[in-house]
Image (tube, rainbow, N blue to C red):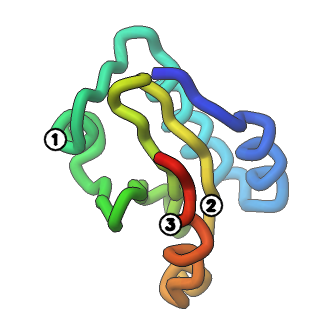
Amino acid sequence: MHFIKRKNVERDLARLPKEVKTSALAWLSVVEKKETKWLNFSDVRNTYARASQVGKLYVFDIKSYRLIVGINFRKQTVYYKAILSHSQYDKGLWKTKFSRSKQ
């Protein structure tokens, strides 16, 4: 898979606890492997059983945070949107903010 906006992920992770950063970077290393090929959400779930789909967005549990991405399966591209705490995620504002993307 190709990952878009790695620098934004690293910027956002810099303000988070070390264990979150370590887990998120481990997630990213799996996503960026040439062997990682996701053709649909079922493939995502085969890699990350606890991943969720919310509309056109995908949510991954990273310690006590939620990593939100868009995925274009045809282009094999993952687009970083945000990493949020549980309380930020639960407010749901991200759903409207990122639902306008052209995924």
Instruction: Indicate the secondary structure of the residue bearing disc 2.
Output: strand
Sequence order check, earlier mark of 3 and 1: 1
Q: Residue furthest bottom?
A: 91
* Pointer 1 residue: 42
Front of the two marks 2 and 1? 1
The residue shown at (51%, 84%) is 92
The residue shown at (83%, 60%) is 15
Sequence order check, earlier mark of 2 and 1: 1
Nearer to the camera, 19 or 102:
102
Question: Disc 1 marks which amino acid?
Answer: Ser
Q: In the rendering, at what x and y percent does residue 72 appear?
A: 41, 36
Question: Disc 3 marks which amino acid?
Answer: Ser
Tell me whether circle 2 and circle 1 mark residues in contact (CB < 8 Å): no
Sequence order check, earlier mark of 3 and 2: 2
Nearer to the camera, 19 or 75:
75
Q: Local crowd at mark 1 within 10 Å, few (<14), some, or many (≥20)?
A: few
* Pointer 2 residue: 83
User: Would you say 32 lies left or right of 35 here?
Assistant: right
Q: Give the mark count.
A: 3
Residue 99 is marked as 3
Q: In the rendering, at what x and y percent does residue 27 appear?
A: 49, 37
The residue shown at (64%, 33%) is 4
